[in-house]
Amino acid sequence: MPLALALVPCLIWTPPAQADDLHVMTERYPPFSYQVDGEPRGFCVDLVRRILDRLGLEDTEIIFYPWARAYRALQEEDGRVLFPLSRSPAREHLFRFVGPVFEDTLYFYARRGAELEIASLDDARRVGAIGVTRDDFYHQFLAARGFTNLDVSTCQAHDFRKLAQGRVDLVPMGEKALAQFVGSIDGLDPAMFERVGPPVHTSGVYIGFSRSTPDSVLRAWRQALDDLKAAGVYDAVMNRYFPPADNSRP
C-alpha cells in the first residue's frame, strides 16, 4: 500500500475518546432548561444539543435531576456535565467550565405591594427571610456575604410559592429568567411579584464539568461553541428564546 494512503486515516479528526463517556445533566429551570411532553427544551438545552451534534454525540441523553443531586454528582463523580451553572470564585476549584453561554443580572423580588424598602444588601439582610435553593448560585452568593436570614429549599419553584404565600420576604432571581420561570409554575404569575432594590450581581452562565474532565474534552466543547457562534447558530438560538429587543449578550 502506498505510504500516502496508509496515512489517510490518521488525518481524520474524531472527538476525544473520553467525550462519549460524559453524563449530561440539567434541572428544570425555564427558559434555560425544561421539558415539554417529556422532551428536553430550553435555551441551554438547544445549545448543548448543537454542541453534542458537532462532536458526533447526537445520541447523548440530557437527563433532568433535582438541583442539589446534580450539583453533588458534579462534585463527586467523574464524567459529569451540568448546565446551566453560574461561575463564581468558590466554584473555581470544584469544576471546569465552558462558556459563558449567557449573562443575567440578579435582583431581589418581593410580593407586589409589599412595599419593602431595599436600597442595599444591608437592607436585604434585615428582612425576615430570603428564599433560596440549596447550593445554587444565589444561596452560595448570599451566604458568602454573611446573610443569616436565608430560608433554604430544594428548588426555586418552592421559593416563589413561599414568596406568594408570604412565608419569605424576598427571592433572588436573574432578571431575564424571571418572567418565563415564574410563568411556568402552576398557580403563579410574574405579575404577582416586583423587582425591588438595585442590581445585586451580574452572573455568567456556563456549562459545568467534573474537575477530572480531560483537557481534550474541554477543548472540543469550547471549539464547538466557538464554531456555533461563528456560524450564527448561537445568535439564532439566543433570539429564539430572548428576542433581540430584550437581549443582553454575554
Image: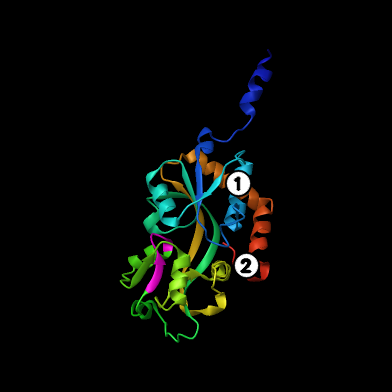
Going by the numbered disc 2, the residue's amino acid type is: Asn
| Vertical position of residue 132 compared to residue 217: above or below | below
- Where's residue 73, x and y in %? 41, 47
In this view of the protein, can residue 109 be seen by the observer? Answer: no
Residue at image point 45% right, 55% down: 66
Q: Which residue is at the far top?
A: 1
- Which disc is residue 51 wearing? 1
| Vertical position of residue 229 compared to residue 218: above or below | below
- Where's residue 127, x and y in %? 36, 80
- Which disc is residue 247 wearing? 2
CA gap, disc 1 and disc 2:
22 Å
| Vertical position of residue 16 compared to residue 41: above or below | above
Total numbered labels: 2
Mark 1: few/some/many CA within 10 Å (<14, 14-19, 20+)? many
Going by the numbered disc 1, the residue's amino acid type is: Ile
In this view of the protein, can residue 50 be seen by the observer? Answer: yes
- Where's residue 192, x and y in %? 53, 79
Q: Earlier in the sequence, mark 1 or mark 2?
A: 1
Residue 121 located within the stretch drawn in magenta? no
Residues in magenta, as a range: 130-137
Residue at image point 38% right, 76% down: 121
